[in-house]
Image (cartoon, helix red, strand yellow):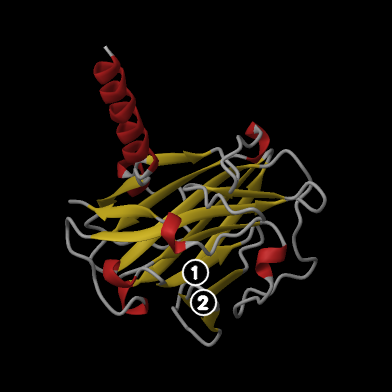
Amino acid sequence: MKIAISFLTLLLVSVSFCFSQTKMNYRINYTKEDFPVAELENKAWDRAAAVTVDKYWSGEAAPKGRQFKAKLLWSETALYVRFEANQKEPLIVADKPNLASKTRGLWDRDVCEIFLAPNREHFREYFEFEIAPTGEWIDLGIHQMPDKRDTDWDYASGMTSKSIVGKNKVWMAIRIEWKAFGKTPKAGEIWPGNIFRCIGKDPTRGYLAWSPTLTKEPSFHVPEKFGEFEFVK
């Protein structure tokens, strides 16, 4: 009997460990037709699966008014990302948005973000893309090491952006051509990455994560906690 109980305990621990190691996964559907980023209602988006991000970076549930959905598509030319965010509180945005060039410090306001590592073997080297409800954006090259982070502030992806603010809702989209990543993915390829949102102001500012980073303080730059984006046709 003791042997049976010990075996059952070991089995439960093993299952629990495997479950804890399971990564978030999103399948990026393919579109044959390219389209402008401003076409937020383009029919191609109907092919994209929606993922709801409903947790803070800590794993704690976020209130519905702060939750958001993300959709991704890919073509032979570019990656498309669309965010649909609930907005039940005042926007934290710039009074005079800069749409002509990247906006440093954008992460201190309301934004949605995606991190992507085009090389699975070097997942600590990735790209960061952010968009605000104003349409402002920033793109960065990141090398996150265990003890420090190198940031390429001059990284120029050529990304384009579009945003629409509605009643209790914000839609934001970005388009990034593959040349910005240095490669074009193939069907079946997996890129590590994560999706985030920053909303509100201190002391109740929220930091949502598709794959929670589980750090003591809010932090998105935890590549060990990246989920997986799989390109499918």
Using the image as rendered, state which of residue 148 and residue 3 is in the foreground: 3
Residue 159 position in % (x across, y down): 46, 73
Q: Residue, x 76% and y 56% (percent of image)?
A: 92
Can you say which quadrant of the picture contains the N terminus?
top left
Using the image as rendered, state which of residue 145 and residue 119 is in the foreground: 145
Q: Residue, x 51% and y 50% (percent of image)?
A: 83
Residue that extends furthest to the bottom in the rendered view of this protein: 154
Give the side of residue 104 with respect to residue 20, left or right: right
Give the side of residue 134 with respect to residue 27, left or right: right
Residue that extends furthest to the top in the rendered view of this protein: 1
Disc on res. 26: none
Q: Earlier in the sequence, mark 2 or mark 1?
A: 1
Task: Decide: is 178 above or below 219.
Answer: below
Amino acid beneath label 1? Glu
Q: Which residue is mark 2?
A: 140
Dot 2 crowding, Cα within 10 Å, few <14, some 14–19, many 20+: many
Residue 193 position in % (x across, y down): 40, 59
Using the image as rendered, state which of residue 195 and residue 233 is in the foreground: 195
Q: Which residue is mark 1?
A: 128
